[in-house]
Each structure stands twice: as C-alpha cells, then as structure tokens.
Amino acid sequence: MDLNDRKKLILQAIIDEYIGSAEPVGSRAVSKRKELGISSATIRNEMADLEEMGYLIQPHTSAGRIPSDAGYRFYVNSLMKRYKMGVEAIEQLQQQLAGKIGRLDRAIRRAGFLASALTDYTTVISAPVSEVMDIKKVDLVPIAEHTVMLIIVTRTVRNSILKADLDVDECEKLAAVLNEKIRGKTADEINLETINEIQLEACQRLGIEPKVLINVMHYIYEAVSELDDTEIYVENAKSILKYPEYRDIGKAQEMFSFLEDKSKVKQLMAGTDSDGVRAKIGTENENEILKDCSLVTVNYSLDGKAVGKLGVIGPKRMNYEKVFASLDLISNEINKLVGYITTDDS
C-alpha cells in the first residue's frame, strides 16, 4: 500500500513531534497541528494503518506511536524539509576553517568540532595523515623449531610468529631479498612485479619454499595495510549523555568504549563511499551497538577524489534536516580549502 498525501503529512508530523519530545506521539498531539486540519479519529485510523505498514511502532498498549527505522528512512528520503543555515553561521564557519588553512589535520579537526557545535551530536572524522606508511626494515628470526618471528618496522614495529622451516642463514638471506625489494614501499606499491622479483630471488635462487614465501608476503601486506594513511578523530562524545536514549549508564559506557576503539570507528566510517550526505538508520548499521543510532556521513574531496569523511552519530530521532544541511555546508567548505592545504608543519 502506497502512502497517500494524508498519511505522509501525519507521518511527518509524528516524526517531527517525536524528534523534539522523545515521547510517544498520540493522535491528540498530531491533531493540534492546525496545518493538518484532521480530526483525532481520522488520525487514529491513519496511525493504525501506518503501524500496520511498518512505519510506526506502538511501544506500549495505551501509548502513542514512535517511528520505526522504515519510518525514519521514508522521512529522510521523501518527507524531510530543506534546512536553511543562517548567514551568520555560514560566515562564522568560513572564518573558523580559513584560520586553519596551514595544516590539513588542523582544518579537519576544526571542521569536526564545528559540526558537533552546529548539530550538538558526536562527530567522527576520518582524515589522511601526513606520514606515509612505508616499510623501513624487515627481519626474520628463528625462535624455535619450525618457527620464525617476522618483524616489520614502519613508524611502529609489528611482529608475527610464522610456521616455517628456515634456519638462521636462510632467514638472513630471505630478509636481505625482502629489504632490497620492498624497503621504502607502501602496501599499495607492493605489486605483482615486485612479488615476482622476490619469488625469483627467494624461491629459485635461495631454494625457499613458495608456501613459506606466500605466508611471509601475506603478513607483510596485511601489517602495512593496517597502518594505512587514515586517522580518526572523535569530537564531543559526551553529547550522548544529553539524550534520554542513553540514560542507562551501561548503554552509555558501551557507546563510549566503542568510540574509543579507533579500529572499530575506522571500519564504521569506511562503510559508505557514496557522494553527498548519506544516513544509516538504526539496523541499517552493521554494528549492533548502533542499532538505536543513526550515522550521517559526507565525503570531502581532493581533485575530485574522496580523501576523508565527516560523520555525525546521534539517536535515531536526530534532527536530520539540520544535520544534513550542516554536513553539506561543512564538506563544501572543506573541499574549497583542502586543495590549498599542505600537511607540512611549515
């Protein structure tokens, strides 16, 4: 069953009311909206239809309704009005970002702070870091029978225990080949040609088993890829305590722990690469901890290529109109600046 105009108006009124009150919305509250001009009895019937269609939920028998994830999705896609940012807010944003033009990381962090100030929600920013993650050195050290420690030095030191029948001499020779071929390279630069060169040296000339080499190369690639060129910043995490959805201290602590885990947040931000402002609502988020939240994100670009992402995390009943407008404005301003920003300290 498609939504007719009246159902759309009622659904929009309920969501607008619930965003502001955080309380289930009854037919009487909706009927007070003069622009609707619909009786309470008619509204009750329409609300029952909307519930049956999956757009509303009745949390308690005698209570009003709240939007379902499907209701929010329809609202965002079809009912949400265009929020107009004030001229003063726009000018202040431009001044604040322009003052950080000397460093990309500072500009991006400032943008996250401003997004949080504009929306009053937690903001997450993914940004390229100034340092290139290249390989400084590779070592192979026998530590027991059939066991070798692989050590990879980038800006940090990573190590792994591998099953391999290599003696001290073989470890030294294989490490020498690896350092010759991949020292100074990033994960993206370890291509098929490089691997073939290593294979020729290590397998054919040194007699290293192909299986051993495959395991070594796999770990090297994975270790360097994990240290990718992305940094994560979280602003205003404490804002979640303002909302009734997080009055439960245990639930709030779980969210804080999630936001402190940079690897999980990085994975979260990597999940959407579409152009424009996009929202993941409730169960659309893969992570269980975000089932009662919405994540709204937008990419910012350099030379037409997305280089980072700005996101807002808040309750499902967030003010989508304002969040979408804020992120759209901020991303446009970052796009203007990012091409002129150098990541050098000078």
Image (cartoon, helix red, strand yellow):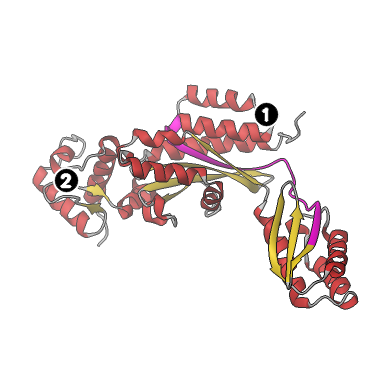
Of the 4 image quadrants, the one containing the N terminus is bottom left
Does residue 139 belong to the magenta stretch? yes
Residue 83, visible in the rendered structure: no
Rendered position, 150 above or below 295? below
Q: Residue furthest right?
A: 205
What residue is shown with label 1? 101
Q: Residue at x 83, y 55 (%)?
A: 183
Does 340 sit left or right of 253 as displayed?
right
What residue is shown with label 2? 64
Q: Secondary structure at mark 1?
A: loop
Does 346 sit left or right of 251 as displayed?
right
Q: Earlier in the sequence, mark 1 or mark 2?
A: 2
Residue 195, visible in the rendered structure: yes
Does 324 sit left or right of 43 as displayed?
right
Of 26 and 137, nearer the camera is: 137
Rendered position, 86 above or below 312? above
The image shows a total of numbered marks equal to: 2
* Type of amino acid under label 1: Ile
Residue range highlighted in magenta = 118-140
Residue 99 at x, y percent in the picture: 64, 24
Residue 239 at x, y percent in the picture: 41, 33
Q: Residue at x 33, y 36 (%)?
A: 243
Rendered position, 158 above or below 254? below
